[in-house]
Amino acid sequence: PWTYVVLFAIVFCETGLVVTPFLPGDSLLFAAGAIAATHGLSLPVLLVTLAVAAILGDAANYLIGAKFGERFLATQKIPWIRKEHLDQTHGFFERYGNKTIVIARFVPIVRTFAPFVAGIGKMSYRQFAVYNIIGGCAWVLICTMAGYFFGSWPIVKKNFPLVVIGIVFVSVLPIVWEVFANFRRSRAAKAANDSTNVPQSPAT
């Protein structure tokens, strides 16, 4: 039973506390599903436990953002929170709108900051709750069942540590791409700004 408690706590903290985006998410769900495939854990209990943790985590993060987010931003000093992560999450909202709550579930780091930013932006809680439930259930179901399906393969059982590392690598790729895209956009904007600010030589 303590295994379920520990898994619940990790998923809740990873999605519910903006200071713990480094905790495992996708890889943990995959690993838990793979363990369930060997009958080490009950799959139905696992799915319910993780889904509840994910939904409650996002709900808590939303409330933290709604109550304290503006105060944190006003100070410009938020311990353990990097401004670029908030800016990146804002970019997701600008691109995908409220669907970000669902899409962000599958993007590390952004997954942790999306409900926090939604709370700061005063997104309707009723609307947030709908996306939260859909995203939380979909994320847990897809990642856990993927581990359950592939965990029963002999080759996966023999190379389980390598498989987990591969899952972590793949789960990080979207955020690496977003960081690279933001870097290119910022360089392009800076170059455009520099070109407009070049001093003109006086006419002779």
Image: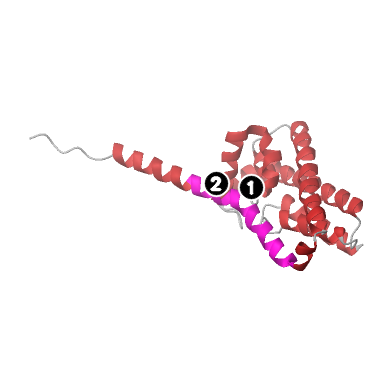
Residue 128 falls left or right of residue 188:
right
* Quadrant of the snapshot with the N terminus: bottom right
Quarter of the image for residue 199 reads top left
Q: Which of 47 and 164 is in front in this view?
A: 164
- Residue of label 2: 178
Q: Which of 185 and 190 is in front in this view?
A: 185
Under circle 1, the secondary element is helix
* Quadrant of the snapshot with the C terminus: top left
Q: Which mark is residue 110?
A: 1
**Residue in view at x 64 percent, y 36 percent:** 121
Quarter of the image for residue 88 reads top right
Instruction: Point out the stretch of residues depicted in magenta.
Output: 159-182
> Please, is residue 187 above or below residue 10 in the view?
above
| Image spot of residue 186 (x, y percent) | 44, 44
Identify residue type, mark 2. Answer: Glu
**Residue in view at x 67 percent, y 52 percent:** 18
- Neighbour class for label 1 at 10 Å: few (<14), some, many (≥20)? many
Quarter of the image for residue 122 reads top right
> Please, is residue 158 above or below residue 93 in the view?
below
Under circle 2, the secondary element is helix
In the displayed orientation, state which residue is furthest to the left.
204
